[in-house]
Image (cartoon, rainbow, N blue to C red):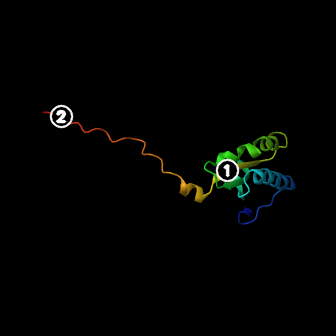
Amino acid sequence: MIEESAPPLELSPEIEAAIEELRCLIIAREPTARFRVTQGFDPPGIYLKVIVDLPEADEINDAFMDRWVDMQVEEGLDLYVFPMESPAGLARREPPPFPYAAPPVITLKT
């Protein structure tokens, strides 16, 4: 499933083909992945946000990374891919431990 931002983006045929190619690579690795296409501004370009239900969203990087780099370097496409963990996946995570232990109480004799 690919969602586009509102209002709909006007994408070049090259960007549309690149998005579809990356989508196929990612779906082959993670069939439940969902996609959202938005206009990005820093850096400027098209952002493909990939929502996955995995413990670590970066686990899908191997599925598309080599081809995506080729698209940017050799084809000059301003297309950026952002793997993101689904809300359900985030809810299942253990909260991180508090980073600091309480300091010991020291009683000073005066």
The reply to whether callout 1 and callout 2 are in contact (CB within 8 Å) is no
Q: What SS does tag 1 mark?
A: strand
User: Residue 39's quadrant in the figure?
Assistant: bottom right
Q: Position of residue 12 (x, y in %)?
A: 84, 56
Q: What SS does tag 2 mark?
A: loop
User: Residue 68's quadrant in the figure?
Assistant: top right
User: Residue 38's quadrant in the figure?
Assistant: bottom right
Query: Which numbered disc flags the more N-terminal residue, 1 or 2?
Result: 1
Could you say which disc has been placed on residue 83 in the image?
1
- The answer to whether 94 appears left or right of 86 in the picture is left
Query: Residue shown at 59%/59% (left/top)?
Result: 88
Query: Residue shown at 67%/56% (left/top)?
Result: 51
Q: Position of residue 96 (x, y in %)?
A: 48, 47
Q: Amino acid at mark 2?
A: Leu
Could you say which disc has been placed on residue 31 in the image?
none
52 lies above or below 99: below
72 lies above or below 89: above
Q: Is 6 or 53 nearer to us in this picture?
A: 53
Q: Is 58 or 78 nearer to us in this picture?
A: 58
Query: Residue shown at 72%/49% (left/top)?
Result: 81
Q: Position of residue 82 (x, y in %)?
A: 68, 50
Crowding at dot 1, Cα within 10 Å, few <14 / some 14-19 / many 20+, comes out as some
Query: To which residue does mark 2 refer?
Result: 108
Q: Quadrant of the C terminus?
A: top left
Mark-to-mark CA distance, 1 and 2 = 53 Å
Q: Quadrant of the N terminus?
A: bottom right
Q: Position of residue 73 (x, y in %)?
A: 81, 39
Give the residue at the far bottom of this rendering: 7
Q: Amino acid at mark 1?
A: Pro
Query: Residue shown at 76%/46% (left/top)?
Result: 64
Q: Is 4 or 52 nearer to us in this picture?
A: 52
